[in-house]
Image (tube, rainbow, N blue to C red):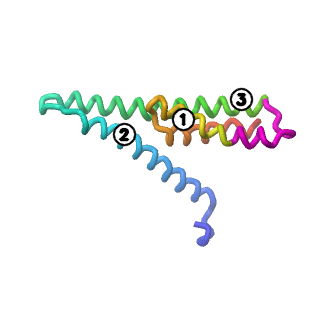
Amino acid sequence: FQSKRVDPHLFYLVFGESVLNDAVGLVLFNAFSKFVVAENPPGKVLVAILDFLIVFSVDFVGSLVLGIFCGICVAFLLKIVDMRKTTLLELSLYILIMYVPFLIAEVTQLSGIVTILFTGLAARRYVVPN
């Protein structure tokens, strides 16, 4: 995109769509892996499909909510902490902003990638005005 001198907004749209596709692909893989491992007799296919839909929805929506919550917490933290004099604190917080939500998501069996995606979106939305 840079060599073709394309509008930067188009780059961000394509990049965001690519990241979201990867995140949804990982959540789908996780849901399908649970669906394939389960031994379901032919009569219980409908139950297995409903279980798949529930697992996918809980994983994706749970990761989305956790990401937005972490992004809002980060925005609040950055609003109350003055980091102009302590560069080490600033660097440490920037690293923790993305690692902590990822670890929380992985421990709770949610998607870390989706959580980080929405943490970044929420943080960008609420941190920049502060």
Give the residue displayed 81% in from the left and 43% down from the top.
87
Label 3: which residue? 76
The percent coordinates of residue 111 (x first, y second) are 46, 37
Question: What kind of residue is marked 3?
Answer: Phe
Disc 3 secondary structure class: helix
Q: Which mark is residue 30?
A: 2
Looking at the image, is mark 1 or mark 2 nearer the viewer? 1
Give the residue displayed 65% in from the left and 38% down from the top.
96
In the drawing, does residue 65 fall left or right of residue 84?
A: left
Q: Give the range drawn in magenta.
A: 81-94
Q: Residues within 10 Å of mark 3 (few under 14, many from 20)?
A: some
Does 12 lie within the magenta span?
no
Label 1: which residue? 103
Disc 1 secondary structure class: helix
Quadrant in which the N terminus appears: bottom right
- Mark 3–mark 1 Cα distance, whole angstroms, equals 20 Å
> Who comes first in sequence, dot 2 or dot 3?
2
Q: Which mark is residue 21?
A: none
Question: What kind of residue is marked 1?
Answer: Leu
Instruction: Between residue 29 and residue 91, name the one nearer to us.
Output: 91
Total numbered labels: 3
Q: In this view, does 9 lie above or below 37?
A: below
Instruction: Between residue 128 and residue 56, name the one nearer to us.
Output: 56
